[in-house]
Image: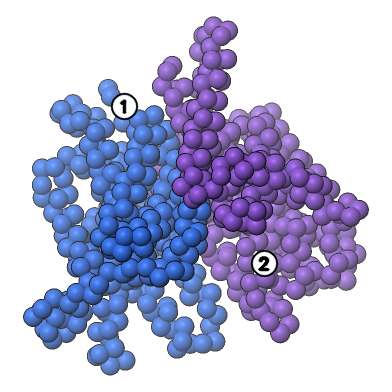
Chain colours: A blue, B purple
């Protein structure tokens, strides 16, 4: 593979991971505030369909994204009402919403299957696009992709360098303490779940209006679950989550490319590989916290057990302490 | 999150301890719940139908009555209800243990795949022996796939939700590989599946109908066994204690982790049995969509009845009738049959809302 090919691949990875960046950043914000939004998969599909449909009718890409963000927020609002307002299991409500939104997208999206729509126009950045190497990799995309580049540092800065971000994290770690300090826990959680929902909605439309243009039945089914797993892999840290997205994008690209390089391996292996990898990564990320497994590793021969323990400890991530638990006023 | 998510979320979903109340209250509660569930669902689905430009009344009539139109659709209804009941029974076990077994779709699929193995390898055995072999292979396949979830959950603390979902996709990948690879039809491989089984190997049907009486019988036995095990045995008590509070159950000497894995194994076996029935009694071949979403539908059923094994039956029949009834919608009204899924999902959502409203009032 020559340099030119490598640069093309790198640019493709960055672009291909953009929707995942939007979705995972949205979910990172949501989960950092202590709420699990398991409805991601269906919500992305519904937002993707809505964004595409609005784009078709208005011939306006921006309106498509606005509508998709609106749908994401609407679904998030339902989740908040049932799980924060009525204090029911977030897992149950999220799962039901995921299925419901998937079927809604199939039903309402029926007239839009395989028809031409609008797309985000390419917008190379003047001057910067002519930079050697960097120009081709970073600056010959469209506004959506640039936004995904900016989103990661922005979310990190907000979470870890601002007062509001500190409060947000307190919601997910010690909501009662935050409440005692005068933080309006539920309204803020509502706000951040809605914000996360809007980002997830944009992620859905990013597929139908840019990366996998057009709409078909269950267009991007499965992506939402991958996004949820990447958030866990990334330990709710924007940088590491973004790394997970790009790693996943790279592996996917590698899979599609090797399909033509190694034709005697059945294609299904490549289609399934991301999900097998998802399980493997979750196992690695969680293994460090299991006492039984720890005991096993300690019994390994010394030159092996030390590095294994080290790697597992590095990979181990801890969820926000109050994640998934409905807040009750003390 | 991965460890405490499932165990922490279940207690609120289980019946609250009885409170002193007057005789009128339960009736009022029931009426409010019914009003929320039926009113909310009708309002939402009607809006969806109107948005798609469909006459709502005509659509409702077809969905509700479609399954009972003639003996043929009734046979279809029973053949869909049977695997749905088996899966719902299995999920009642895992939900009681506090687990969200979203991997049930994959457990059905692997059950179906393994059920094919004896049918393909030993077609010359007497059919009854083969049926027994296929059913047990299916049950063990589903159990194996579920145990994978259990082992990972137990030894690495990975959430059973994500492992299960990942394994679903892998199971479908395996099916596609078999259908397009080693088990492909002579000549053309296609999404229509493998070569149909020889007619001698089909489970016997009622004369002139697609109804296989054995399927509903197996399903009824399955749900009865689960009901008995959960509510009438010490094992079931320990399982429910584990679901309510794993740490407390362990302190009391309940082998909680063993109960978690056993509930998954039981659910997997029932789901695998459902998969074997899909092969032996419904499709008579391995097709890529062999599970037909029955596992996820069963999750909705069990969430709606709040893990109560007695109500699983009626709700499973109701949901199956929506699915069968909506099959003719594309032909008659030109709309997509996924409206059945919308209706089922909305019902469960409003049932959850009704439950939350009731609990708030106390």
Q: Are marks 2 and 1 in contact (CB under 8 Å)?
A: no
Above/below status of B262 relative to B191: above
**Whole-percent x and y of residue B45?**
51, 41
Chain of the residue on which disc 1 is drawn: A
Q: Secondary structure at mark 2?
A: loop
For the question of whether residue B80 can be seen, the reply is yes
Identified at 22% across, 71% down, the residue is A142
| Marks 2/1: CA–CA distance | 48 Å
Disc 1: which residue: A328
Callout 2: few (<14), some (14-19), or many (20+) C-alpha neighbours within 10 Å? Answer: many
Q: Secondary structure at mark 1?
A: loop
Above/below status of A9 relative to B4: below
Q: Which corner quadrant holds the C terminus of chain B?
A: top left
Q: Quadrant location of residue A257?
A: bottom left
**Whole-percent x and y of residue B217?**
80, 44
Q: Quadrant location of residue B181?
A: bottom right
Residue positioned most to the top: B22
Q: Quadrant location of residue A150?
A: bottom left
Please state which of the two labelled residues, at mark 2 or mark 1, is closer to the viewer: 2
**Whole-percent x and y of residue B260?**
55, 43
**Same chain for marks 2 and 1?**
no
Chain of the residue on which disc 2 is drawn: B
Disc 2: which residue: B287
For the question of whether residue A309 can be seen, the reply is no
Q: How many marks?
A: 2
Residue positioned most to the bottom: A2
Residue positioned most to the left: A127
């Amino acid at each position: 593979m020559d340099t030119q090919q490598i640069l093309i691949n790198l640019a493709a990875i960055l672009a291909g991971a953009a929707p995942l960046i939007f979705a995972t950043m949205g979910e990172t914000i949501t989960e950092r505030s202590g709420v699990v939004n398991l409805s991601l998969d269906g919500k992305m599909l519904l937002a993707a369909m809505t964004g595409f449909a609005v784009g078709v009718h208005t011939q306006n890409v921006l309106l498509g994204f606005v509508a998709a963000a609106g749908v994401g927020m609407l679904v998030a609002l339902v989740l908040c009402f049932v799980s924060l307002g009525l204090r029911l299991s977030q897992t149950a409500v999220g799962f039901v919403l995921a299925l419901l939104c998937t079927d809604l997208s199939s039903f309402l999206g029926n007239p839009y299957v395989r028809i031409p729509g609008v797309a985000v126009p390419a917008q190379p950045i003047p001057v910067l696009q002519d930079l050697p190497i960097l120009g081709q990799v970073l600056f010959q995309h469209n506004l959506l992709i640039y936004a995904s580049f900016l989103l990661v540092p922005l979310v990190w800065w907000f979470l870890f360098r601002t007062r509001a971000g500190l409060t947000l994290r307190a919601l997910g770690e010690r909501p009662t303490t935050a409440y005692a300090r005068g933080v309006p826990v539920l309204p803020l959680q509502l706000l951040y779940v809605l914000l996360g929902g809007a980002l997830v909605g944009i992620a859905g439309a990013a597929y139908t209006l840019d990366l996998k243009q057009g709409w078909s039945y269950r267009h991007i089914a499965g992506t939402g679950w991958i996004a949820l797993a990447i958030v866990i892999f990334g330990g709710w840290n924007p940088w590491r989550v973004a790394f997970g997205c790009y790693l996943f994008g790279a592996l996917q690209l590698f899979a599609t490319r090797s399909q033509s390089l190694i034709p005697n391996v059945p294609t299904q292996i490549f289609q399934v590989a991301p999900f097998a990898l998802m399980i493997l990564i979750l196992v690695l990320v969680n293994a460090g916290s299991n006492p039984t497994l720890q005991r096993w590793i300690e019994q390994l021969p010394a030159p092996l057990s030390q590095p294994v323990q080290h790697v597992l400890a590095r990979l181990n991530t801890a969820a926000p302490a109050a994640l998934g638990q409905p807040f009750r006023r003390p | 999150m991965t460890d405490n998510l499932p165990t922490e979320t279940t207690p609120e979903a289980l019946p609250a301890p009885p409170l002193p109340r007057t005789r009128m209250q339960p009736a009022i509660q029931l009426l409010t719940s019914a009003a929320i569930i039926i009113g909310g669902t009708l309002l939402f689905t009607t809006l969806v139908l109107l948005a798609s430009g469909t006459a709502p009344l005509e659509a409702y009539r077809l969905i509700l009555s479609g399954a009972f139109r003639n003996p043929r659709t009734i046979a279809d209804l029973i053949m869909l209800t049977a695997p749905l009941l088996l899966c719902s029974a299995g999920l009642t076990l895992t939900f009681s243990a506090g687990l969200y077994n979203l991997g049930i779709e994959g457990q059905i699929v692997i059950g179906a795949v393994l059920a094919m193995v004896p049918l393909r390898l030993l077609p010359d055995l007497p059919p009854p022996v083969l049926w027994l072999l296929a059913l047990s292979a299916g049950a063990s396949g589903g159990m194996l796939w579920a145990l994978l979830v259990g082992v990972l959950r137990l030894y690495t603390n990975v959430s059973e939700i994500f492992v299960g979902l990942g394994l679903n996709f892998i199971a479908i990948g395996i099916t596609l590989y078999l259908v397009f690879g080693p088990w492909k039809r002579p000549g053309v491989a296609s999404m229509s599946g493998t070569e149909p089984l020889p007619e001698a190997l089909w489970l016997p049907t009622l004369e002139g109908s697609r109804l296989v009486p054995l399927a509903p019988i197996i399903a009824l036995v399955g749900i009865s066994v689960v009901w008995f095990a959960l509510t009438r045995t010490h094992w079931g008590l320990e399982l429910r204690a584990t679901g309510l509070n794993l740490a407390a159950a362990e302190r009391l000497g309940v082998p909680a982790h063993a109960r978690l894995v056993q509930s998954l194994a039981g659910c997997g076996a029932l789901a695998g049995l459902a998969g074997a029935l899909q092969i032996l009694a419904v499709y008579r071949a391995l097709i890529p969509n062999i599970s037909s979403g029955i596992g996820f539908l069963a999750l909705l059923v069990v969430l709606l009845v709040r893990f109560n094994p007695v109500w699983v039956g009626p709700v499973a029949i109701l949901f199956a009738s929506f699915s069968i009834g909506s099959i003719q919608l594309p032909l008659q009204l030109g709309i997509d049959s996924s409206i059945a899924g919308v209706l089922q999902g909305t019902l469960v959502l409003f049932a959850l809302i009704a439950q939350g409203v009731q609990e708030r009032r106390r």
